[in-house]
Amino acid sequence: MLQRLKALFGSRPKESRTLLETDNVPQHIAIIMDGNGRWAQSRGLPRVAGHHAGMKAVKRITVAADRLGVKYLTLYAFSTENWKRPKAEVEFLMKLPQEFLSIELDELIEKNVQVRMMGYKSELPGHTLSAVEEAVEKTAHNTGLVLNFALNYGSRKEMIEAVRQLAESAREGSLNPQDIEEKDLSAKLLSAEIPDPDLLIRTSGELRLSNFMLWQCAYSELWFTDVYWPEFTEDHFHEAVREYQRRARRYGGL
Ligand code: FPP
């Protein structure tokens, strides 16, 4: 416990040390990393410079989540709708996973982080997919933080695919539609092996879900900040977790 507290507060200036409850850390934090483009434009930089700076924030927050003892960190890196962006921006975004992993994979392995991907693989360029798959493979046996990249992910598509699978089982006669329960649909989603997010963070002041984990976030605590993703720091991350710890989760009960 003392070690964990030291890890959290050891090197920080005194005024920013605010007590976090170490026994009430969200097990799963999901983040909509928004505001890269506006961050860049506000500095007179091209939008892609914002994505590059966003990649550095990914590193920062992965380290912060690991230090805090979060078990799952899901990051919305590219949505099924993001293909609509200009070709050059899409190409840049598709190069970031391999750049990130070429720099960080060794450290992720050292930190016992398990990399996963949640999204539709077939549309991804080969170089993106092979970088991610290599990381997934090399970290598959790690038991620490699960760093889950939502890449070419869309919640409605995910739900439609799940419903199709259930409907297929019903047609074959192996499933009675009347017996379908929540857990049956959950089991068909791309997130089947991870628990629902406890806390959903969205940066940049936008107050919407943008087709992100709509089913899974039914009872997640939502936290929004005006800070653009490239400027999001460990302190902001702690602020979100502290707010989460102040909330009473009732799941529809009293
Ligand atoms: C939304 O900001 C952000 C994205 C569509 C991309 C997010 C990607 C990263 C943060 C880097 C990912 C890194 C790895 C390692 C996979 P926006 O561009 O829509 O911002 P805007 O609303 O200000 O235009």
Image (spheres, grey):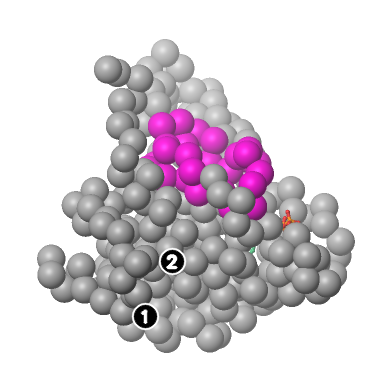
Is 2 situated left or right of 244 in this image? Answer: left
Between disc 2 and disc 1, the foreground one is 2
Q: Quadrant of residue 106?
A: bottom left
- Which residue is at 63% across, 59% downward? 228
Residue at mark 2: 234
The local secondary structure at tag 2 comes to helix
The disc labelled 2 sits on which kind of residue? Glu
Quarter of the rendered structure image containing ligand 1: bottom right
Give the number of callouts: 2
Q: Magenta residues?
A: 194-223
In this rendering, is residue 178 above or below 204? Answer: above
The local secondary structure at tag 1 comes to helix
- Which residue is at 38% across, 23% downward? 181
Residue at mark 1: 109
Spatial CA span between label 2 and label 1? 21 Å
- Verify whether residue 160 appears in magenta: no
User: Residue 180 location, x and y as percent?
Assistant: 41, 21
User: Residue 5 location, x and y as percent?
Assistant: 20, 68
User: Residue 202 location, x and y as percent?
Assistant: 56, 49
- Which residue is at 57% across, 75% downward? 56
- Residue at the left extreme of this rendering: 1
User: Residue 79 location, x and y as percent?
Assistant: 67, 52
Is 81 situated left or right of 217 in this image? Answer: right
- Of the numbered discs 2 and 1, the one sitting upstream in the chain is 1
- The reply to whether residue 130 is visible in this rendering is no
Is 167 situated left or right of 37 in this image? Answer: left
The disc labelled 1 sits on which kind of residue? Ile
